[in-house]
Amino acid sequence: MKLIYSVLQATSTLNQMELIKRLLEEKGWEHDYRNTVSVWDIKDEKNNAFLWFSLATIAYVGDAIVPYIFCTKPKAVYVTVEGIPNKVTIADTNMDKLDFITVSEYSKACLQHVGLRVKDVVHHGVDWEKCQKLRANSDKMRAHWNKEFGDRVIFLYVGRLDPRKGLDRLSRAVMLLNQTYKDKYVLLMHINTMPQELTMISNVLQVGVFGSISHEDVLTMMGACDFGLFPSVCEGFGLPVLEHNAMSRPVVHAWFPPLSEFSSQDFNYVFDHQQESLVDQAHYQSWIFHEYKPEILAEMMAQAIEIRLKEKKQYEEHCTKAAEHAKNWDYHNVYSRLLGHLGIS
């Protein structure tokens, strides 16, 4: 039995596709990648099911429409979207003929807002057992960091330089926090391009280029820090929050959907956003920015520093709870549901 799949060439989707492929193999299925799934692939008797994994804008799922419509075999279009699609760009495209499976309830609501069909929600996942095994590597990395940073609290940001990621707010928050706490913490940035405002601050350092090292190494870094830092204002899912938790680390982040679908206020260090605003993204969609003041982010980072330095038992309890919570999103749990839509049990 063989699944043919097409996947968005982005770090997070590629990593999640690896989990889906692993589950397929565990169930005895073969899989084969296509840049574009053709009608000929659909007709090939050796191909038994089809999966498109992408961003739900016409620029990315447009080439799936024709093969999807003609396909009578098991099929699924698994998508993320960070905002509301532009009705003008999807008009007369037959995009409404697709039955989407979204990565979050939030993405589902965004698609339904413009009349698109969503038949299910399947969150992203983690390899929970693998994350626990990587803890030994994280301990070694932390020992190396301790030689360099001493007992300073270590925050880690993992992501791209992108308007959605809230790095303008993070830059301002760091400047405010450094008025009191500069010698008590460091901020490590695993990012493709450092924000200009942060490049000259001595306790902010870049550690590797986002997308250039293995996923295992990124997870190892997550387990070596004290807190994940996720200043984002707009997400389709928000995978680094879940991955930090799976590596037994709490995360500082704003409380908004879809993060609120899988995060927890019980052990993550969260704060409310004040308002929402629509931001045009290349006319394909309107991002929904969940706006907050940098001062609030700085205050939450300060609270995290105080707990890590002065309330060790409480901090360790948060770490334990984070890992146990993330176990619910092990890929066997979440992606078995996705494969069920493809007739794979």
Image (cartoon, rainbow, N blue to C red):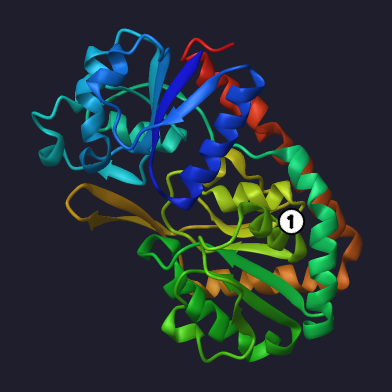
Graded by Cα atoms within 10 Å as few (under 14), some (14 to 19) or many (20 or more), the crowding at tag 1 reads many
- Judging depth in this view, the residue of 28 and 204 nearest the camera is 28
On the image, the x and y values in percent for residue 276 come to 35, 54
On the image, the x and y values in percent for residue 129 come to 77, 38
Residue position marked by numbered label 1 in the rendering: 249
Locate residue 114: give its quadrant.
top left
x 85%, y 56%: residue? 136
Which amino acid is tagged 1? Arg
Taking the image as shown, residue 73 lies to the left or right of residue 294, namely left
On the image, the x and y values in percent for residue 310 come to 87, 72
x 40%, y 47%: residue? 9
- Judging depth in this view, the residue of 109 and 53 nearest the camera is 53
Taking the image as shown, residue 5 lies to the left or right of residue 215, namely left
- Judging depth in this view, the residue of 32 and 229 nearest the camera is 32
Q: Is residue 192 above or below residue 340?
A: below
* Residue 257 can be seen in this image: no
* Residue 132 can be seen in this image: yes
Locate residue 219: give its quadrant.
bottom right
Image label count: 1
Taking the image as shown, residue 98 lies to the left or right of residue 146, namely left
Q: Is residue 136 above or below residue 310?
A: above
Secondary structure found at label 1: loop
